[in-house]
């Protein structure tokens, strides 16, 4: 059950180039939030600037607080980055279908800020392994505490492995098997799915779409699946990658 | 005690606040936040005879103080509606208005025939104004004769209230409204979305998959108020349900002052999910401040300048 | 070097940025901030035959991402215009378009007769769309036959470019535009303001003295883009001047992508007085980024989805 | 000649209930600003919230800085009150016709925040006297330095004289004569004008109207005068009170 609350910003700090961590006091939401779920985060602006709330995945939820990792890409995220502790913003959550809890092992594949929900999964699940990729070390999020085993890759090789985050996926599946959970750019998720499919393991992805209501009421956020249009906010954001019509997805 | 109830023709609503079609489903989702029975009523998403996939994504896009949508009347058809949604509506203790759209007069008639017997439905909203469907969309809502014929043809099929929802994308909304009323519509709902589009200068592509979309939200409040005022002035006896641009409770009150006896709230819910409920409270507070005993007294209370 | 010049029929502008009628006077006031000659052109406030006091205040009111105005074509008449403003226009090195409105065909003709001989005028914009005048306002702009007749009657009186400025408050803007073009208009300007109103819930009075007003500003950008796109699609050979909702340089570029060969900037100047000049620079930058050698190439570059 | 500049907030401080003093770095504007003139003060909000700038009279202009005294009455003034030193906002000015510099003595009559332009006049002119009225002492602006002789009145008598600010005007004119300059609520200005007229001295008032352009281009801000409509932003805001059609003015 979602709650719409006015939540106080407890802390906000930059953790990478253009990326910040935001912690909000939201006890009801924190109690119920599960990895893969998200919130519609709003603004304090009486004249509708911006008009719509922004969907953000939980990167953690504990002790009555929820945490987001946000990359500034436009005006909404820029406004959020300017918040200061003590300010209050409206947030509606938890929303959406969480990641299914894996029976066996879990390989988490996070590209860019897509790592956020996977950090939450990493903290909640048993011994997952997190492959985390960024373009370069400037963009790499500084983690205050890493919830699970983590393998870092950067495209320019400035930190960790050199290359795409998916480059190491085959090896990981080989090593321990388990289900793949991917979040990040569409190209990356698609690649993760292809590798998982080839190797016969399940793959779940967390997709993005522009959202208005965030609760499933407006039919605005659909993506094409093999079973017709599905709402990212309600039927997703987590989908079985095998169900997605990847050709129809823009990247 | 303020009497918040309002009458729209023969239908009595416990308060003047209704959720608008397409922005609230049938109330299931927002129903997790508060009990829809606290509202005056709800209008379901528009139902069509056959299931409709809807338009290709992206379907929405934010604009200055508003948004564009081009959902394309996505819905699972009247059969699935009766099977899946009617049991949900049964539990609601507020006016349950079903919005319907057809691609021709027959489809409207067939929809009414199938839905009229159901006790869970308190009235119909005839959507002749959705800009997103090639047939049955604009064509219907922009021609007074066609609207008149449509209402003529379905009026005998039901005793339930028939509301006609008007498009603002016409030269003279009063003509269309009058045609509907002359043919027996019980109330006019205004407005649906304004035709609009948005373009990404980087990709040079439309922001909406279907190119053309409908503009809603606070940006359109002045246009909506104008249409409500025009309709109420020309047809003072006809109940007008004001829709468009309500972002705060006070905006709903301006609709009523302009002549609406009730309001519908659409996209204002997206940034502010509790808006319908807060609007009920806001109208009550307004009555207290202004010393009104009934919310009905707000309707048409506009004070025009003496010329 | 980017070639920013654009052609609108026979008229060549040094860049696509024009200030819109009624928002810039004749350029005297904003001319204190920057030289109007740096713009592609200016459109004067609308001139009428006789002086007009205009509507009772309040004449403006802020709305969500926009504003309402009901100036009522306040101007001191064509005589005073020739005496006081023509000498000012003489010094401007950009296209000087005079906007005119009459209460009947004769008045339009008389205005052209008096203004046509003046070398300080590079073209006329026929304002058939101002919603604020009881006669000569809406009546003209909403009827294709009347617009056609009007253009027919003045076309023989001048060799200068005749632009017709369209109202968005019609069911089918293309019909009106086509009528104007068929009668010899050189370009279509779209859009004028949307009809709107606002109400103060405390006093229950309209926020605007004249009650009815025109909505402009970023709120209406999606509507304006839609109309420009419709006109350009239906009349690909006709130059379209895009107006409405430009609040940033990028908004002007969306107008051009949708099909406008030039743009006019109105109320966006009020919060952002340097907007016209910044838009010239923004268009140049856009050309550089996109590897275009001419600003003209932006016009109509919209990429539609393959169905 | 007006300038449109992005100006840094140098200081901002509360000086009465709901009222603050805002100092901006704006050298070109400060150099030219004269008492009675105003600026169109804007916001930093890319999505037009609020859309229009707000007209504010200069209460001082010196050493490259301009000062405003602002009372919070709505969203725009509330946003301004939330600014912090170092932030930048756009301001366009100086605008409008200043007070005509009096030949002889000057009696300045300021009601509420209408005192702002009169403080500026008080600092620039020779020996004026300022009558300043507020509803009560909570609303009375705390002056860091008073530029001229000042007589305070509050309606509830909590500070200074008890009653309306105009109550003492007759006596002042009797005492030293001179021109009356009034700014404040319409009722107050009208009363000041009536007294001045009765006593045969000139009276200038500074009027308010909603403004869009602020420079005289849009014809949006007119008020009715005996000579037809006049633009408050360009022909005013200072008018000879004898020219105003007081009946047509709302209060
Ligand atoms: C389920 C979900 C979870 C997400 N989790 C995160 C997260 O944890 N951290 C993070 O940094 N970002 C996340 N995003 C993306 C984030 O929502 C966008 O970056 C953000 O909405 C951009 O807003 P803006 O105003 O800065 O950008 P603008 O481009 O100015 O936004 C304009 C409009 O487009 C929408 N929009 C733009 N980009 C996206 C996008 N990628 N996805 C959805 N809507 C978009 C905005 O919400 C807004 O309505 C998530 C998206 C979804 C759908
Ligand atoms: C020449 C001039 C000088 C002024 N000097 C000062 C000053 O020194 N200190 C001060 O506190 N106030 C001054 N005002 C009044 C000030 O402009 C308004 O209080 C302010 O615009 C209100 O904005 P808001 O967003 O808080 O209120 P809202 O009511 O939300 O504003 C809505 C719209 O109405 C306009 N508006 C509202 N009230 C007024 C008003 N009284 N006058 C003009 N427009 C208004 C706003 O500018 C805005 O466009 C002056 C006004 C004028 C015309
Ligand atoms: C996402 C969305 C979907 C909509 N779907 C419908 C619909 O199915 N039928 C209908 O009559 N109106 C539909 N509308 C229009 C709204 O009911 C309403 O008339 C319009 O949005 C203006 O009101 P608002 O400004 O409060 O949103 C839809 C609007 C939105 C934003
Ligand atoms: C204050 C004001 C006055 C206007 N006066 C005129 C006018 O005299 N003639 C005219 O054709 N349009 C007039 N307009 C309309 C504008 O020229 C323009 O078409 C409209 O405002 C939409 O553009 P915008 O969103 O950029 O403002 C006026 C608009 C405003 C805001
Ligand atoms: S955002 Fe409304 S259904 Fe998903
Ligand atoms: S505000 Fe535009 S003329 Fe005064």
Image: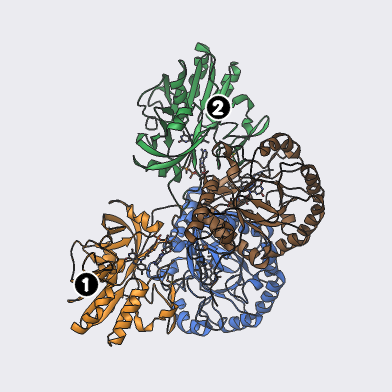
Chain colours: A green, B brown, C blue, D orange
B123 sits left or right of B35 in the view: right
Say whether residue A52 is visible: yes
Q: Nearer the viewer, residue C206 or C242?
A: C206
Percent position (x, y) of residue C174? 68, 62
Give the residue at x 38% y 60%: D73
Determine the residue located farthest toward the front in the rendered image: B1
State the mark number for residue A205: 2
SS at mark 1?
Answer: helix
Q: Quadrant of the C terminus of chain C?
A: top right
D38 sits left or right of A242 in the view: left
State the mark number for residue D122: 1
B301 sits left or right of B142 in the view: left
SS at mark 2?
Answer: strand
Do the dots labelled 1 and 2 sit on one chain?
Answer: no
How far separated are the C-alphas under marks 1 and 2? Answer: 69 Å
Percent position (x, y) of residue C136? 62, 76
Q: Nearer the viewer, residue D210 or D109?
A: D109
């Amino acid at each position: 059950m979602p709650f719409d609350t006015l939540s106080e910003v407890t802390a906000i700090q930059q953790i990478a180039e253009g990326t910040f961590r935001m912690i909000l006091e939201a006890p009801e939401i924190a109690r119920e939030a599960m990895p893969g779920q998200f919130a519609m985060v709003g603004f304090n602006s009486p004249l509708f600037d911006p008009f719509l709330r922004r969907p953000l995945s939980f990167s953690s939820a504990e002790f009555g607080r929820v945490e987001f990792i946000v990359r500034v890409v436009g005006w909404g995220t820029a406004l959020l980055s300017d918040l200061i502790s003590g300010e209050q913003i409206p947030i509606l959550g938890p929303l959406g279908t969480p990641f299914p809890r894996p029976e066996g092992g879990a390989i988490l594949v996070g590209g860019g800020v897509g790592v956020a929900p996977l950090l939450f999964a990493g903290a909640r699940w048993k011994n997952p392994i997190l492959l985390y990729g960024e373009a370069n070390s400037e963009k790499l999020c500084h983690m205050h505490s890493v919830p699970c085993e983590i393998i870092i890759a950067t495209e320019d090789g400035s930190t960790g492995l050199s290359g795409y985050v998916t480059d190491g996926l085959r090896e990981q599946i080989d090593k321990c098997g388990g289900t793949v959970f991917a979040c990040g750019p569409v190209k990356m998720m698609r690649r993760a799915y292809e590798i998982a499919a080839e190797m016969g393991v399940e793959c779940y992805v967390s997709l993005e779409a522009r959202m208005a209501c965030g609760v499933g009421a407006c039919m605005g956020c659909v993506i094409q699946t093999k079973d017709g249009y599905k709402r990212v906010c309600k039927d997703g954001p987590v989908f079985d990658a095998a169900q997605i019509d990847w050709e129809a997805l823009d990247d | 005690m303020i009497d918040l109830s309002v009458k729209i023709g023969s239908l009595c609503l416990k308060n003047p606040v209704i959720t608008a079609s397409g922005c609230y489903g049938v109330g299931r989702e927002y129903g997790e936040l508060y009990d829809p029975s606290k509202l005056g009523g709800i209008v379901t998403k528009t139902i069509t005879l056959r299931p409709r996939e809807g338009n290709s994504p992206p379907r929405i896009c934010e604009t200055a103080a508003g948004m564009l949508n081009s959902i394309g009347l996505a819905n699972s058809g009247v059969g699935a509606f009766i099977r899946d949604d009617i049991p949900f509506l049964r539990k609601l203790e507020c006016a349950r208005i079903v919005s319907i759209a057809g691609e021709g007069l027959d489809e409207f008639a067939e929809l009414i025939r199938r839905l009229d017997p159901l006790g869970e439905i308190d009235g119909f909203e005839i959507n002749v104004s959705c800009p997103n469907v090639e047939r049955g969309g604009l064509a219907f809502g922009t021609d007074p004769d066609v609207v008149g014929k449509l209402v003529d043809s379905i009026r005998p099929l039901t005793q339930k209230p028939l509301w006609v929802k008007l498009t603002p994308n016409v030269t003279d909304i009063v003509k269309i409204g009058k045609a509907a009323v002359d043919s027996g519509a019980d109330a006019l709902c205004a407005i649906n979305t304004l035709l609009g589009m948005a373009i990404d200068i980087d990709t040079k592509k439309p922001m909406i998959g279907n190119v053309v979309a409908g503009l809603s939200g606070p940006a359109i409040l002045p246009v909506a108020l104008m249409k409500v005022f025009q309709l109420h002035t020309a047809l003072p006896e006809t109940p007008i349900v004001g829709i468009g641009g309500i972002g705060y409770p006070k905006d709903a009150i301006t609709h009523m002052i302009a002549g609406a006896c009730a309001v519908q709230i659409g996209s204002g819910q997206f940034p502010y999910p509790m808006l319908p409920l807060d609007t009920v409270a806001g109208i009550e507070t307004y009555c207290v401040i202004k010393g009104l005993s009934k919310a009905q007294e707000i309707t048409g209370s506009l004070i025009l300048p003496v010329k």
